[in-house]
Amino acid sequence: MAVLGVVTGLKSEAKLLTGLGFACVSTGGQAREARRKIDRLIAEGVTGLISFGIAGALSPELKTGDLVVADMVANDIGEAWQTHQPWLDALPLAIEPQGNGRKAAAIPHHAAARRTEGHSGTPPLWSSDGDLADNAQPSVRASSVTSAVRPGPAQSGPVAGVRIGAVLGLDRLLSSPAEKAEALARRGALAIDMESHHVARAAGERNLPFIVVRAISDRADEVLPAIMATFVDAEGQTKMSAVLSALLFGRVGLGQLLKAGGASKRAHQALHRCRTALAGLG
């Protein structure tokens, strides 16, 4: 039976897809873990790959909780991969509309968001960087190029709050609005995450279809303390010792954590709307 592999940064993102029969791995935003775990999925026989989770916005038009379905993924060395066109055509049409009446409390979300409700945790906040290729190839292979181009404007999806466009991947977090603005000006992608470029490269090398679905957790004009990148382990779980230490030594403020937690919760709620659409890919 065909099984699709899902790659997330966080365990909480993978839990949103519980019961759908996917093979899921979480990488904690760590590059070495990402490729190792993706290779394991492929060795176990998955027939396609999905990059799923939260992301940082590059486009100032995106707000927290917006969904991005990628038509292209690029990395920071001038490679780019097109996502699987049949999935790109079908998936946005199947995403549940906003405001479907589901209670927010019933939707799993990251421990960072639960902190605002009297529990524990803090947010992993993803941003990345890369160069869009001017001749991106389908997912069967990537094209290495030296020039970057600015693609056309992103398309609005058939469902409110869904955008179709390019996603960049980098193995580090972009923490300042200036960094994000520079990346947007040079590369023109909608959003950034820390897993999709690894998924795209692996899919291209193995001739597997892939798609990217990401929900915005931090806007283009928001500052993200770089220390937040250390708050998640290689399994995508919150490291409370790192969170408490950062709070104790003033490396991050409680207000920043509460704000980021709320944003993470909204992004997780948006991702939950994609369950039915993703299930239909299998």
Image (cartoon, rainbow, N blue to C red):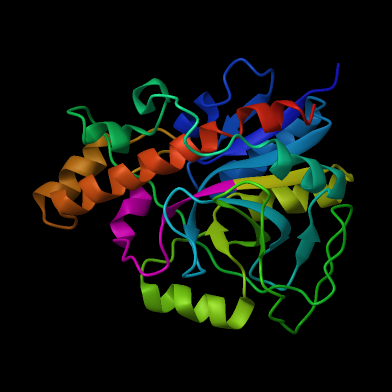
User: Residue 39: horizontal and vertical position, in percent?
Assistant: 73, 38
* Picture quadrant where residue 134 is located: bottom right
Q: Residue at x 43, y 76 (%)?
A: 179
Residue 238: image quadrant is: top left
Q: Quadrant of the N terminus?
A: top right
Relative horizontal placement of residue 129, taking residue 73 as reference (left or right): left
Frontmost residue, 194 versus 189: 189
185 vs 211, left or right, is left
Residue drawn at (80%, 36%), measured in percent from left and top?
48
Observer-nearest of 9 and 84: 84
- Please state if 218 lies on the left or on the right of 13 as rendered: left
Residue 108 seen from this side: yes
Q: Name the residue at 61% across, 70% down.
A: 130
Q: Which residues are magenta?
A: 214-230
**208 up-or-down from 185: above or below:** above
Q: Is residue 225 magenta?
A: yes
Q: Position of residue 187 (x, y in %)?
A: 62, 77
Q: Nearer the viewer, residue 132 or 219?
A: 219
Q: Residue at x 76, y 65 (%)?
A: 80
